[in-house]
Image: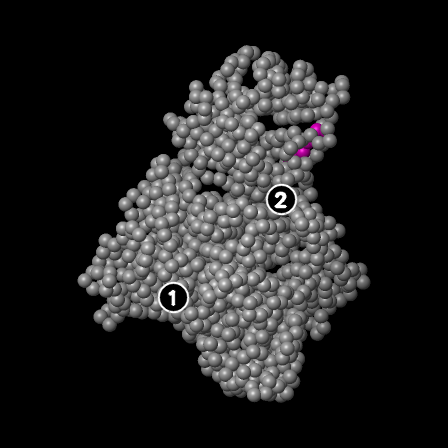
Amino acid sequence: MGKTSKDKRDIYYRLAKEEGWRARSAFKLIQINEEYNIFDGVLRAVDLCAAPGSWSQVLTKKLRQNAENVEDVKIVAVDLQAMAALPGVIQIQGDITKLSTANEIIKEFEGKNADLVVCDGAPDVTGLHDIDEYVQSQLLLAALNITTHVLKKGGVFVAKIFRGKDVTLLYSQLKQFFEFVTVSKPRSSRNSSIEAFVICQNYQPPEGYEPTMVNPLLDHKYCDFNQFTGPNRFIVPFNACGDLSAYDSDTSYPLLLEGQTSYEYKEPVQGPINPPYKEILDKTKFSNKCWRNINA
Amino acid sequence: MSQFIHTDVTVVKLHQDFIITGIGSAASVFERNSLKFLERINCLIGQKIYGIVPLKDSSKFLIFGGKQFTVICIDCNLNGDTNGLNIHRHFKPLVCEDWLHSATWVDTNTVALLTAHNAVQIWDLRTQCILSQHFSADNSILYSGLLLPLQDGLLVFAGTVFSEVIIHTPLDEKPLHHLKGHRGVIFSISCNPQKRVIVSTSDDRSVRIWGINPNKPDLLSNTTEYWKNIDIVCNHEVYGHTARVMRSSITNELIVSVGEDSVICFWGYDGKLLKKHETHQNSPIWSVDANNSHLVTGGGDGAVILHPLSMASDYGQEESIILNTQTPAIPKKIAFTARNNLVILNDIDSAIHYHTTNTKTTVTHKINHGSTYKLLSVSSCKQLIAVADMSGKLDVFAENCKEDCITRVVDTNLNEKVLSMQWAGNRHLVFCGDNGNITVASSVNSTVDIYGDFVLPNCKERWLTAAAMDVKNKILIVGDRCGNVHVYVKDQKNPVKTFNKVHGRYGPTSITIKNNEFITTGRDGTIRYFSVNENDSSLAKYMTSKELEFQWVEKFIDKEENIICGFKERIFVVYNVQNNLKLIEVSCGGGHRSWDVVRYIGKVGDEYDELIKLVYVKNSEICSHTFQLSKIMSKNVINSSHSKEINCLKSFKSNLDKTISFYVTGGEDTTLRLSSINSDLQIRDEIVSKHLSNVRTVKIVDLEGSIIVVSAGGRAQIRIKLIHISRVDKHLKASSQELIDYLIKGKDKERKNNQTWRNSSIDFDPETRIMDVDVLKQNDKFLIFAGCSDACLRLFSFIYKPGNVTFEPIGEMRHHKTCILKTTCVNFLDKDILITCTTRGEVSLWDVTDIVSWDDHKPFFSTITNKCGINSIDTRVTCDNILIATGGDDNAIHLTLLEFPDLNLSGTYVKHRWSTDKFHCSQVTGVKLVDDLLVSTSIDQRVTLAKWWEEKEGIRCDFQSQIFSDIADIQGMEILSNTSGAITVCVFGKGLEVVELPK
């Protein structure tokens, strides 16, 4: 594939590189904010499953506008994987299903709760949709579980969700903890993609709810008000977000965008760190190198 | 109700004489020897099956998947009558709180389950209640797990996201062992305690073979004590797959792993890679099971394939043939004869006949050649062997049909230069000499008659590479070194029809004439099909081609043209093109050496088997390789189809048999396929064409007996095919003909002006995908509207008449600002109206009646329905209004009723709107209006039936019923039939399912 074909195929991939974001997903958070103003008054935010760090980048930029003193802004990024450092972001390399991780976050906030928790985590997809959807829902529930430890009442939780066959089970679960639950698709997320985002506002845990990390939060079962098939399914309102005039992720744009006079190819801002296939790549690198030398 | 399903095969099980498969929520049973389908049963509810666990005495099978499990029993009368198979389910599936990774029987009425959060549940099947539950301290999510029943408890293998396998028991607080070393998610764990081996597969592309070393050897391996007193070490970390390794299976002799790369790897216990076998058409292999004789695999292409285990170790019988000639000589050319003997030309001008069963040379004929440029050709019956040299010396030998020897029947000199010589059938020899002079000779007794003279058009290296003759219709078809194919008729020197450059620069390797068609093969990795008109050969047409996975395609070795052989670089390959299975792969050095192959039925021991024998000359020696097919040949239990998502589907029926539905499908795997489902619920499909990129849309037009198929998609490619259905014996046969292959942006070469990639400058134009097309018949031509991803609407005209097939762009319309997702045409008030939908939820109507100029054409009406992209649209036209149903990415369905005051398009307005976002919880990808019913489907895998009507206050639509489909990632649907009681629809996405919706 040519160097520029990715740039041509995906406008947001290209814009992300031009604007210095580590991933195109940065635009998704920006567009969610345009619709829901989730950053209003937020000083303390948690970015779960943060790597490669594009949402932390957005948080840093946006939250600093909320504070007179930059020191008041606290952003904690949590991920299992290592992430390249970001100025102004406290990093915790840990598992979001562990109580220790929740305590570490609270420690960073000096005992205070977070105003906003975001999670853009996605599992390693297998290609079997039901497993992928299940693992994604477990990731979201793990994020919700840790959120119940760190989020202030009235706070906001934003997470990636796969709108698969059992998504209504998650909706009904989220609705137990938040007054407003809507599902949203930023213009920068592709039409064909199963991914969407839940925006959960006004955190109000059920009365007597004690956050616990001992057992994982399991998802709901189908019931009378949320049938497996039928007229009574628990479906939350949907909103598209992002300006109507924003770029459309499905549209192919020329390399020279309207109003531009030149185009320059840019390398990605941050490459992957230690992927699982690294070993095999290293093993086969020799032959690739030889091939390249022959062709040089 | 599901009538047919073809999708990912998530579990396969070999059990006694049966193969049991889990496809979607149903289990199917096949007989292992005959591969006959026996019975199917719905097991789970809206959940794929991931495990089938038989009870020891085979009286019951535990079926689980997702959070559900149930028990079925298979009663069979094994005394020859497997038709009496009776399957039933014991109870409706029970639902656990968590996903299940593994399950096992504790006793006849108790089962143990391992959940994705590493909890072990014990269930009593009689009361259908949980007896006990044990949570492990390590409760982060598992990707795989294995429960091993022990005499005194259970052993748990948990494959974590943290790249380790934890071995624990529900009774012990602390895990017994941690198997560390993988660098990615663990996808599967298998264990064979008798063989003291554990196998884990992972995201990191590796397979790890762990050895169990007992510290107290007298403990039995099915006791907890034993597992506490062992050391587990990673004996081998092996790499054989190029993608993630999904599953493994352990047999007595070897270890099998299957991967996302469509590869089966056979490993020895010593970690040695015994064999790599590619299967399942590049789609992931999800499931595997093996016993000590067979291996069965299930893949993402929906196929279930049975492989003999011997394929891992049976490399065929290899021997070298020593010719005991008096004078030492080097073999140069070699070929098989009718009695499967060999005829060999050597460097000292001898033709030798070698008896393969007696391993003896029977006869040696001296040939007086004047040139070292020698040619050897065997007639199609293989009884006649022609030998010639460049100077024109010709000898023909005949193999005696009763005795194993050859006699010389022709010994002559043509007195002209011979550059190439081929038999065309059994009676005619085709020579090509200087200046493209083609002479066709036929032999009568010992003299040579000239049948005809022809002239090969001028080309580089002007001689032939293949020839074939239709004696009855007096047609000669030849292929030359430039890849051209020429058709001649008797008494006309020049070709009546030439197909230029059909097979690349080496020329066709073989030509086969069959009834009204001929088939050519070439070294460009293709088989090409042509039709011939017996009355007028100049009307020969190129029909279609098949692409194979190896470059050098040589010839068919069966009479039905299904089994083809060739070379993949240095490897000799035999491939069945009918069911896409590779039969043989053997390294022999490549096709440039002299070689031949024969397929026959021969005696092996006491039984007859199908054999394939390959001979080739290597290092001046003759090597022979014999394969017993039953030992190495895989067989399809269920045929394969698309290896990735199906993006589009259209169905049609032929007038010849209205009971059979044909499906034209286009997919993410870049193929366009034509398929049908037979009465045994077996799918048969054929690749009609291969696009450069994904196929996003297909439309069909019925032309009395033939179907025009327009497909389009990525790389802005449009292809048009003609499909013709005819009756052959009792069956319907589909043949296809390529009409148009068009790239909006031009072919790569045109776009880059022949520059190499190094010198080419950046192309600023966007790469465009065609998202949807619609075809409109206007007068004698077709108009094709293409909605593209660069927001441009493009119009083409297509003319299809005998002798006139043209396709040309008419114009581009840049009205929309974002990607166009859907285009559809309706006829209303005698006007042709085009409707376009975009990613912004916009619906625009264009008047395209008698389009002359496309300049400044604007939609006459636009409205916004959905909040996001519109994935599906359907319309219902009455005499004075149009009802438009749209389904979008916002999980909403909109009904929009358009009114036309004074029946004039200019005053169009929306009379009523209705919408709901409660029918589906995910993208709505299919809507259909059928009379007063609305059918919709979505990625959420539901198909909804609703009823709509118009009232004074507006349009109303009420939910009627909903069913679940096992097809993931549903991309759309097609209505197959509509009767008073039910609507039958076909939903497609990751596979396809035919379901019936009761009204």
Helix, strand or loop at disc 1?
loop
1 or 2: mark nearer the eye: 1
Which residue is depicted at the point 55% across and 53% down? B761
Q: Please state, as top left, top right, bottom left or bottom right, where the C terminus of chain B lies in the image.
A: bottom left
* Mark 1 and mark 2 residues within 8 Å of each other at the beta carbon: no
Q: Nearer the viewer, residue B167 or B932?
A: B932
Three-letter residue code for mark 2 = Pro
> In the image, B748: left or right of B14?
left
Instruction: Using the image, determine if residue B851 lies above or below residue B486.
Output: below
Chain of the residue on which disc 2 is drawn: B
User: Residue A226 bears which disc, if any?
Assistant: none
Q: Which residue is mark 2?
A: B308
Q: Magenta part mainly helix, strand or loop?
A: strand
> In the image, B198: left or right of B857?
right
Which residue is depicted at the point 52% across and 49% down? B752
Whole-percent x, y for residue B878 in the image: 24, 58
Q: Which residue is mark 1?
A: B841
Which residue in the rendered view is the most extreme toward the front?
A: A261
